[in-house]
Image: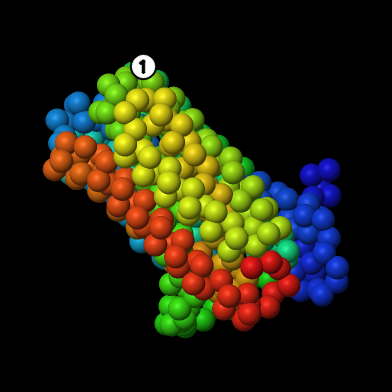
């Protein structure tokens, strides 16, 4: 069976280039690569947000202020955002498989060094956050690695399944607080190297670059999409959907411990429930966008997210807040899949760099949300202003997607629903 999957290289390539009727999803691409992309993305996201679940313990040890806690958990998000552009360039120049291997080695080496030497200051947490940014930048590698094997009519499902690696944030929320209580939070950094190393071996065995790799271009050519307004729209839309998802994933352990006095382990369980909801629906969001169009899906996403985040700002009890966070994460996770159903419809030839650019915008949105929640808590004594402002950004995105939908449907002609 594995050999049969492995031998679908030519079938996947012809499915992309042929005008023949659409084949089933599992016959259209390269399943081992899709699985490898998911595993790489999943474990990378696990360590990308690792500082969030560990934040209550780190803060207690180092005596951090609310603003410092917010900046600590936001730093990996910003570093990952910027590094996604770098990875997008590498993907188009040396291929996604080699780019992914290099990134994984950097993260494993950085975590091992942090565990061996110890992290003893706020500056040290920021330095570690930059290293963890390489894990967050995996987004710009894993998605093109999977996407290039699949034709336009299956892009939403392929990108959604690979992107379901967002679920790695659930693993961090569930296990990091428990391991920190048992062994100390610094030991968690070393323990994380074990599953990362296992996945690296699996990745090297199973992943394979698509034969449809674009020819290398001049460095300046990679930024050509930024001259087109559609690129900025897609970046803005993802800054809200993914920015909201990852910003909440990193910040909720702090919110639950500070707002409701939960223990780090209980806060981790609550965070895991919210993050699991957003991760689970990402492939569903891609599949739904394949069926009804990414534009329709995003209109619903932004409306629900805005209402849920505004409700969180006024939630007085833990059950109310938890329910609204789950609703917000369901919407944002669906939106993540929907945006990346649209990206390859418009920028198939530049999918590597566009994945990096759009992913960067998502990371910037997450950095803003995580850091603004810490600042809001320190300046006003409440997280509410941070949630309300981000709800306003969701409303702005709703207005934006409505304003461009008619032009996109009239000018994009890929055969897939817009």
- Residue 205 pos. (x, y %): 65, 47
- Residue 319 pos. (x, y %): 42, 25
Quadrant for residue 279, please give it. top right
Residue 380 in view of the camera: yes
Q: Nearer the viewer, residue 43 or 371?
A: 371
Is residue 190 placed above or below 402 in the rendered structure?
Answer: above
Residue at left offset 59%, top offset 43%: 281
Q: Mark 1 highlights which residue?
A: 182
Residue 104 in view of the camera: no
Q: Quadrant of the C terminus?
A: bottom right
Left or right for 166, reference 133: right
Residue at left offset 86%, top offset 68%: 21
Label 1 sits on a secondary structure element that is helix
Q: Nearer the viewer, residue 99 or 309?
A: 309
Residue at left offset 51%, top offset 73%: 404
Left or right for 336, reference 179: right
Quadrant for residue 69, please give it. top left
**Model colouring:** rainbow
Q: Nearer the viewer, residue 388 or 67?
A: 388
In the displayed orientation, state which residue is furthest to the top.
Answer: 182
């Amino acid at each position: 069976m594995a050999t049969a999957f492995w031998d679908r290289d030519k079938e996947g390539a012809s499915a992309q280039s042929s005008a023949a009727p659409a084949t089933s999803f599992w016959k259209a691409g390269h399943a081992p690569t899709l699985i490898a992309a998911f595993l790489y993305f999943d474990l990378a996201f696990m360590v990308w947000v690792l500082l969030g679940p560990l934040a209550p313990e780190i803060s207690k040890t180092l005596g951090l202020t609310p603003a410092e806690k917010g900046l600590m958990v936001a730093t990996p998000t910003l570093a990952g955002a910027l590094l996604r552009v770098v990875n997008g360039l590498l993907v188009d120049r040396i291929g996604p498989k080699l780019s992914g291997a290099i990134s994984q080695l950097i993260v494993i080496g950085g975590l091992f060094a942090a565990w061996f030497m110890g992290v003893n200051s706020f500056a040290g947490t920021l330095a570690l956050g930059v290293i963890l940014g390489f894990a967050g930048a995996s987004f710009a590698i894993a998605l093109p690695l999977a996407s290039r094997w699949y034709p336009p009519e299956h892009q939403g499902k392929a990108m959604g399944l690979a992107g379901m690696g967002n679920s790695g944030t659930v693993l961090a929320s569930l296990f990091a607080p428990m391991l920190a209580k048992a062994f100390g939070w610094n030991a968690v950094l070393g323990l994380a190297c074990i599953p990362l190393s296992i996945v690296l071996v699996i990745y090297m065995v199973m992943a394979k670059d698509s034969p449809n790799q674009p020819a290398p271009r001049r460095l300046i050519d990679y930024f050509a999409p930024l001259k087109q307004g559609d690129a900025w729209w897609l970046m803005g839309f993802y800054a809200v959907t993914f920015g909201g998802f990852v910003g909440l994933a990193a910040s909720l352990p702090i919110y639950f411990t500070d707002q409701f006095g939960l223990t780090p382990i209980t806060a981790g369980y609550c965070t895991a429930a919210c993050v699991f909801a957003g991760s689970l629906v990402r492939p569903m969001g891609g599949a739904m966008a394949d069926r009804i169009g990414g534009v329709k899906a995003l209109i619903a996403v932004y409306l629900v997210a805005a209402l849920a985040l505004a409700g969180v700002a006024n939630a007085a009890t833990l059950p109310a807040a938890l329910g609204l966070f789950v609703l917000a994460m369901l919407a944002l996770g669906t939106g993540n899949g929907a945006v990346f159903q649209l990206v390859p419809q418009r920028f198939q030839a530049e999918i590597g760099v566009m994945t990096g650019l759009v992913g960067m915008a998502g990371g910037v949105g997450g950095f803003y949300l995580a850091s603004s929640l810490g600042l809001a808590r320190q300046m006003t004594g409440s997280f509410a202003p941070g949630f309300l402002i981000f709800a306003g950004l969701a409303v702005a995105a709703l207005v934006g997607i409505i304003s461009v939908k008619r032009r996109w449907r009239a000018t994009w002609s890929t055969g897939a629903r817009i």
